Image: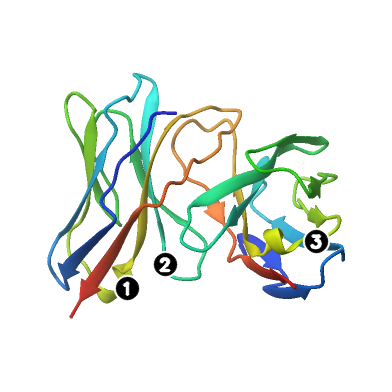
Amino acid sequence: NAGVTQTPKFQVLKTGQSMTLQCAQDMNHEYMSWYRQDPGMGLRLIHYSVGAGITDQGEVPNGYNVSRSTTEDFPLRLLSAAPSQTSVYFCASIKLGQGPNYGYTFGSGTRLTVV
Amino acid sequence: DAKTTQPTSMDCAEGRAANLPCNHSTISGNEYVYWYRQIHSQGPQYIIHGLKNNETNEMASLIITEDRKSSTLILPHATLRDTAVYYCIVRVNSNSGYALNFGKGTSLLVTP
């Protein structure tokens, strides 16, 4: 199993540009989520999804859109990039319904710089 | 979610046990204690979790006090590769999924 795969690993955008950060998992996990991590800070939840066709906002959703058309994929879209969105983005997933026996699986991150 | 308090940083000699404390004095009866770590520039990694009993797995042990107001993550024989930021998170577990509230964690430095 590949686990959680994020692409690209690095990206530089100009202010106002749009882009999509990709996240894919091959573990049949229903729950997928996006976090951002700013320097010296903990992770903050952006958006999450409990299954295909279902998404919801987290703590810091402004400026980001998500969709979940398949169980495997959960892309994060930046509509008009701003310097404040310079951060490291992590995708995480977990299988639901198995009780408190497992932790989240995280991807290796996408490092985004907006200039 | 209950608030957690962790020391900002700790040192540990290689081969010795690393004991990372976490205070969660406002924890509710149905909240679990989770531990994750983040090695530099990598995604967080799940370590262990518990409700009220002590837990052990291949990575670590988790000791939760009887009143559940604090816990300690124990890495029995720390190696240089255990240098990381360790996060203690308290959260109600739900079969519908749950968000992880990461604080700033404890930066553990394992020295030769």
Chain ID at mark 1 = B
N-terminal label among 1 and 2: 2
Chain for mark 3?
A
Q: Residues within 10 Å of mark 1 (few under 14, many from 20)?
A: few
On residue A81, which mark appears?
3
Compared with B73, A9 (above or below) is below
| Residue A8 x, y percent position in the rendering | 73, 71
The residues tagged by marks 1 and 3 sit, at their Cα atoms, a distance apart of 36 Å
- Please give the chain letter of the residue carrying mark 2: B
Q: Nearer the viewer, residue A20 or A100?
A: A20
Which mark, by number, is residue B12?
Answer: none
Q: Residue at (21%, 67%) from the top-left corner?
A: B78
Considering only vertical position in the picture, is A88 above or below A13?
A: above
The image's mark for residue B39 is 2
- Whether residue A29 is visible to the viewer of this picture, yes or no, is no
Using the rendered image of the protein, determine whether residue B60 is visible from the camera's viewpoint. Answer: yes
Q: Mark 1 sits on what residue? A: B81
What type is the residue that disc 2 sits on?
Ile
Q: Are marks 1 and 3 on the same chain?
A: no
What's the amino acid at mark 3?
Ala
**x and y percentages locating residue B76 in the rendered image:** 17, 59
Q: Residues within 10 Å of mark 2 (few under 14, many from 20)?
A: some
The residue sitting at 39% across, 29% down in the picture is B2
What is the x, y in percent for residue B62? 24, 43
- What amino acid is found at the position of numbered circle 1 in the picture? Arg
* Secondary element at tag 2: loop
**Spatial separation of the CA atoms under disc 1 and disc 2:** 8 Å
- Locate the N terminus of chain B and report the quarter of the image it occupies: top left
Q: Dot 3 surroundings within 10 Å: few (below 14), some, or many (20 or more)?
A: many
Question: Whole-Å distance between the Cαs marked 3 and 2?
Answer: 28 Å
Count the labels in the image.
3
